[in-house]
Image (spheres, rainbow, N blue to C red):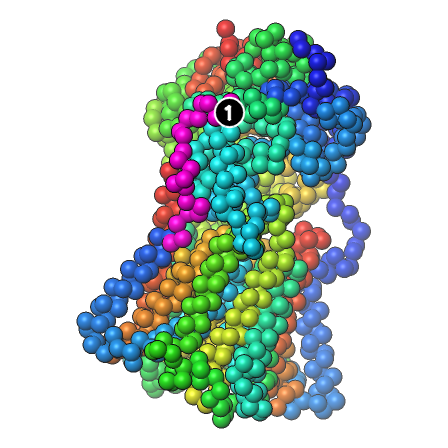
Amino acid sequence: MTVAEAPPKEKTDFVRLFLTQRIPLLAVLIVLVVVTFFINDAGGYLTAPYDFDYMSASLINAVPLAMLGLAEMLVILSGRGGIDLSVGAIVSLAGMVFGFAYGMWGWPLWLAIIATAAFGALCGAVNGFLVSYIGFPALIATLATFYAFKSLAIVINNQQPISTEPIQQLFSLSKSVEIPIIGQYIPDIPLGIFTFLLPTVVAVWLLMARTAYGRRLYAIGTNDVAARWSGLPVRDTRFKAYVYAGLISGLVAVVTVAQFASARPDAGVSGNGMALPAITIAVLGGVAITGGIGRVAGVVLATLLIVWLNAGILLAFVGNEGSQYQLLALGAVLVFAALLNGLTNRKYGGAQ
Amino acid sequence: MTQEKVQPRLRLTAVSKRFGAVRAIQHADLTVQAGQVHALVGENGAGKSTMIKIVAGAETADTGEIEWAGEKVRIGSTTDAIALGIATVYQEPQLFPELTVAENIFLGKELKKQGRVDWAGQNTKVVELLALLGLPARYATATVGDLSIAEQQQVSIAKALSGDAKVLILDEPSAILTDAEIETLFGVVRRLTASGVSVIYISHRLDELFRIADEVTVMRDGRTIGTYPIGDLSVRQIAHLMVGEELSDTRPQREVPQGPPVLELIDLSRTNKFKNVNVQVKKGEIVALYGLVGSGVSEIAACCYGIERATGGTLKIGGEPASPKNPEEAKRKGIALLPANRKVEGMFGFQSIAFNISAGHLTLLSKLGVFVDRAREKALALDMIKRLSVRTPHERQPISAMSGGNAQKVVLARQLVERPKVLILAEPTQGVDVGAKEEIHRLITELAEEGTAVLVVTSDLPEALRIADRIQVVRGGTTTVEFGPDAKQVDLLAAAAGGSE
Amino acid sequence: MTTVAEPKAPRTSKIKNLPSPITGQELVLVGVIVILWAALAVSTPAFLTAGSIQPLLVATAPIALVGVGMTIVIITGGIDVSVGGAIMVCSVITAKTLVGSGVNLGVAVLISIIAGAVLGLVNGVLIAYGRVHAIIITFGTANLFMFLGLRIFGSGTVNGIPGTLGFFGRGPDGRTLGVPHAFLATVLITAAAWWYLRHTAGGRHFFAIGGDAQAARLAGVRVQRRVLLAYVITGVLVGLASCFVIAQGTSTLDQSVGSGKELAVIAAVVIGGTSIMGGRGSVLGTMLGALLVQTVSSGVTQLGWRSQLSDLFVGIFIIVAVGADLLRARARRNR
């Protein structure tokens, strides 16, 4: 203990690098997935061509997934068992709010979007208040609000979706567009990528990597006792993580309404719901469930991996078999990522 | 007095133990007689805890012999120790709060009757055990989480004795107890020795040894200085044996500028923790608060920094009353604090040096109050690394990969960024190697030279003497006597440990 | 000579061997359920009739039964969010077997239980020996189980399920002296689990693991085996509960079976006073929690309100139940 510990070995250890650096691992996996499907495509094993156009079109699925993955990243990062099971229910409820505002009350689009995002933030504030100020375990608080928001979303308009004229026309938002100047050389890209996903990714990246708030969030997630002794506003910081997660969920609500051309009361909770895949994406992207570790790039790459894997699976199987194998892929990848995280924690003291 | 009449129950001869390059103990001897309370005393780092770990089987000795009732034995593991009849009660009770006392005592070795736990049988045994300790039988079925800390400690003792212990090690049992609770503890210890159990009693409070111990072994610098019947010694004599020969202090006297106090505690109190604490620290002055574990010193520091709230008295900064409600407010008022428990309260483990330094000063380091100015952050980190001679390849090194001394310098650097008016240092060199300790001490002096009012809260006696201009002794939750820098260690120790006259 | 100066001489004959078996949370739940039943009885006269109470008890059974296993899992400090998927796998296997080979009741139940045990074993091995956070692993296996279930389904539904499991159903075959068998079985299993958790060394070890797994290991508790067992027990109960689920339905089983059940079960456990942090919990509380949730759901329907409104109440109950617990814990700490 009195001897200074030896500096970490400078020897480049590829296994170590591969296991501890999530981003190169994900990049390699993405290449592997894409190449696999290209080969299958060339061999004629797929029901439709798996090419850049198809990959680009499938990115529309990345929009809600990556955004909610980032929302989960924020709350999981905040530590103390942070998690948000309610994001899907917020998407449903905020989607209905958007449906009312834009589809029925005739608010201008920009105002309706802002109102929806603000409403999502309000829902997140309920979670944040319960978790950060009252001291509820996040799992419990967000389980309760999951039920509450889900119920309200269904009851608020008598179980009826809102798909009035203005809402239906929003479908154009999820169309693919040609990018100016270079657009003719590359495939068309879904509009939602530019209008929602990229701004969110950039904003969250700025927030986490560049702002003082991001630093505080990493600090409380790493060690909230030390954060308190450093004079950081621990509660306020954790509270805001849930608010931001709610805000992002509100934006996803707009995306989802546009995608379905309808504000559906069960949009975020039907079937498997949206929370589970979002948590999966976050964990796969290298966010440590114990808090303090996680990067935007990891979450984005994890989304691309899952989206392109799912897109390929859809072509590799006939009918709804494809969607079934997507579950297999998601589950297997998550278990693999979790075991990998466990292994790297034991062997190398954590992934980065 | 009654030597060689019977074999001693436990005898350690010429035991040595190294940790890497450090000699934790060398050629230590310990002889414990049946039915006696044997006190083990020594300053922090004198080797007491290594000694008891060897007895308890948590560490194995490198050399030396252990005899049990005259027979040579080997204690290779805690299981070996328990099998012999050696039980240990550590400071922190290791109990399951949701289970009952009886369950805690029998966990993993439940009595069974037809497949189910024999509650009646267990309870009978537990009640017997509790009776032996003079504790009420109702404890047996109480849930541990419902008991007070003192009661939990008594349960720990009962648990330790449940394996038919012949030697019971109590590691600073009184540190967390009130006077009344200590009296109960002594009652328990007396009953045990009356029934033939030997007790190895580790304590910093020297005065209480005279009420409970039969013999005392003094350790210093990893060696056992000697074993004495308690009646042959006084508090002062024990203190003297603990600190050894006074080294002539070569520290040059500092000129402390005269002026009004920057930090002033007037009759500061917190219920059940400390009361009527009076301290003044002037600009450029280094004052040490010296007290044993449990004396209330650490709580005083926490109060000054707003981690805990005082319940009485006043705290003044620059003459203005200021009772910080939280660390943020304390920082705004110009108070910085280096926490005592580096790993838990100080370090952001897997984050970089730069992150650890800037963590408390993000507003200061940001552009437009929002974005972190990373160039300034890096410059600040590099500046601090240089100023505090932190040994590291670069500022992106995770703090968890650094040695104790270097990590401590980084945590200290965080406190220096905004040039605090008042700097409180809690155990600034705990778990830090000698070289880094020197450097940290030099740095503290420099800070004072530059005009910071420094309050060092420490249980490290030589440290207090080495750096402080004045030393306030805290005992029993209150400030008692004040010493100058030319005080003798033995006087300070005697004042803190009881029986100063 | 050690007994001379006993400070407070106890009357040993009066000592109870264990703390009270009923906790405050359970009493409160009983109180809330009684008030709700009374209120419902007043507002809708049809509520307190066999025709209304019997389906309520039948519907409570699968949630309460899986809740027993979930309670044990949560007591050890874990969680299992894969039970919904597991219910799907067990029920589709059992339904297909019933359709295909017409096995009898006992065999059908056995098949379902074995299927559940295998799924529980998968979770248990990954969690106990892979040493990964239970919530992550079971999120993963939830997807895997759903995949498995859907593959076995093949087409959209399983049709023409014979009434073999009617013994656990809503019909007259499913009752003895007016008590539904599914509920009776659940009560008996809950009672057995309660006894096991309270009176055996193995049962107590679950609590010790949840309190402090490391300390439990040092005390000689076989932590990994115990944790594994907790998930296997959950799997077995999922197997039996799946039979109840099939029995409650029509002769057709569709792919939505089991969907969302994991959250319903966790809600019942949490409302029942089991701490999500581990170390504390009660299967009786879980039973009452499940009954409360079902009462609300049934009451909302009978009052003519929108049925989805019951989820709002479930959310509120969770907040109130856990919030009260937090306040109690805070009061205890400040004492």
The image shows residue B224, relative to residue B323, as above or below, that is above
Q: Tell me which corner region of the image, top left, top right, bottom left or bottom right, holds residue A318.
A: bottom right
Q: Relative to residue C132, is residue C62 drawn left or right? A: left
Residue sitting at x 61%, y 34%: B164
Residue C278 among magenta residues: no
Front one among C311 and B303: C311
Circle 1 marks a residue in which chain?
C
**Image location of residue C234, percent across then percent down:** 54, 67
Front one among C178 and C41: C178
What's the amino acid at mark 1? Answer: Thr
**Quick check: can you spot residue C72?**
yes
The image shows residue B64, relative to residue A11, as above or below, that is above
Residue sitting at x 67%, y 21%: B32
Residue C17 among magenta residues: yes
Residue sitting at x 56%, y 10%: B235
The residue wearing badge 1 is C2
**Image location of residue B96, percent across then percent down:** 52, 44
Give the structural element (helix, strand or loop) at label 1.
loop
**Quick check: can you spot residue B281?**
no
Q: Please name the predominant secondary structure of the magenta segment in the image.
A: loop
**Image location of residue C80, percent across then percent down:** 53, 65
Magenta range is C1-22
Residue furthest out toward the bottom: C160
